[in-house]
Structures are given as C-alpha cells and as structure tokens.
Amino acid sequence: MYSDIACPWCYVGKKRLDSALQQLQKRSPSEPIIVNWHPYIIDRNTAANGENYEDYNFRRWGSDHWTISLRNSSRRDGVEFKNWKTWPNSLHGHRLVHYAGKKFGAVGQSKAKDILFRMVYEDGKNISIVPCVMEAAKELGLTEAEDYLKSDEDIDLILSEDLKAKSSLKISGVPYFIIRNDKKQCRPITLSGAQQSPAFVDAICSLNEL
C-alpha cells in the first residue's frame, strides 16, 4: 500500500483494507496476507511544522467543503475525524513507519500507521514535529527511537521512495494498492482510492483462484 499520513482518504482506506483482511483471515486462517507500507508524500510544499487545518484547506482548495462527503462516507468505517486540527508534514511520520518496519516487520508498520492516523485525525496532534512522533514511537514500544528521529537518517530514503512511486510507478494519487500472489506467476491487481472492503476481498480472492 502506498499512502500518506497527510491524506484523510488513506486513513479511511486503511480501515477498509483492515476490515477486508479480517474477513479473509476468518475464511482462510492459514493463508498469510502481508501488507507492506510504502511512503507517498502528496504535498512536499507543506510547511515543515505542518499547517493549520483551515489555512491549508483555504490555500489549496478555497475551503474545506470537500471534506463533507469524506466525513459522511467514513462514519460507517468508524472514522470520525473528530479533532482534525492540522495538515501535517508527514516526513517524520513516514520515517517512524519505516523504523517500526525494521524493528517489527509489516505488523509494526501497520500499528505505526494506525497510531499516527489516530493522532492526526482523532486526537488533534501535529505529527509534523519530532516530539509528537516520539509519542507514537513510545506507544509502539520504541522508546529508543528518539535519536533516530532527531537525526537525518532515512530522510533521503523516504524522499527517493516517494519520487519512485510518482515517476517509475506513475502513481498520481493515494491510497494505492498493488496486490500480488507470490506463489503464482500472475499479473498483480492494482486498486486506487479508498475502496470499499468487498473490493479488496474480491481482488485477493481472484488472485488465489488463478
């Protein structure tokens, strides 16, 4: 999955993907499904310390009216956007997801995403800044991550992965999903946008049936 923490639809998309994975695990508990998370930065021009929610929406779109349909659509997924105060610069958040992956694998990446999404959209936190990202790291049990986050380590890696997604893979929007079956030589299925859970179930099942 390619996604940006500074993307409310990516938050919704993860909820729907997780719901689909839970359904599939109930059907076939012995079939492992691994989700690898890749960084994508929608707006590299976001201020380093993030921007006020209203100010950012006014700068980009003239208002936040576009979020009405987002909020209405996502309620059934348990996404409330109850305290969305900041449009974050997601660089340090992506770094934490990467670091969690190195420590705990794909499960760690997923947990990091969950915490960061919650902090931005439900808790009113600004994950643009290292102290706030460090709160997420501590929640993950990565109390030693402070030196990493205060350094420049992996910044170039995150930026190069973002560039690769946009240039080599031609991804122009997120969330974006590339679904493949490593046991079979078949073409991957790609899905774009915060698809409903049945779309993920159908795509994964179709690859298993080929």
Image (cartoon, grey):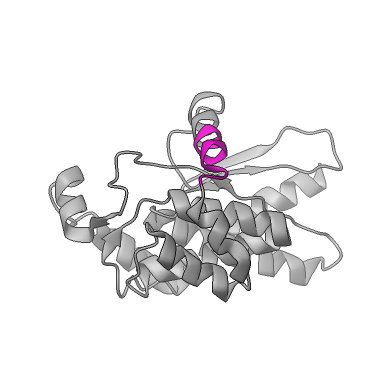
Q: State whether residue 194 appears in this view.
A: no
Residues drawn in magenta:
152-161
Which residue is found at the position 60% from the left and 71% from the top? Answer: 143
Image-based side of 4 in relation to 137, left or right: left
Q: Nearer the viewer, residue 56 or 169?
A: 56
Is 71 rendered above or below residue 164? below
Q: Position of residue 16 (x, y in %)?
A: 53, 62
Which residue is found at the position 66% from the left and 48% from the top? Answer: 203
Image-based side of 26 in relation to 121, left or right: right
Where the C terminus falls, by quadrant?
top right
Query: Image quadrant of residue 99?
Result: bottom right
Image-based side of 16 in relation to 26, left or right: left
Q: Does the magenta stretch include residue 21?
A: no
Q: Position of residue 11 (x, y in %)?
A: 45, 60
Does the magenta stretch mainly form a helix, a strand or a loop?
helix
Q: Where is residue 91 in the image (x, y as percent from the top left)?
A: 44, 48
Q: Is residue 155 magenta?
A: yes
Q: Which of 172 and 23 is in front in this view?
A: 172
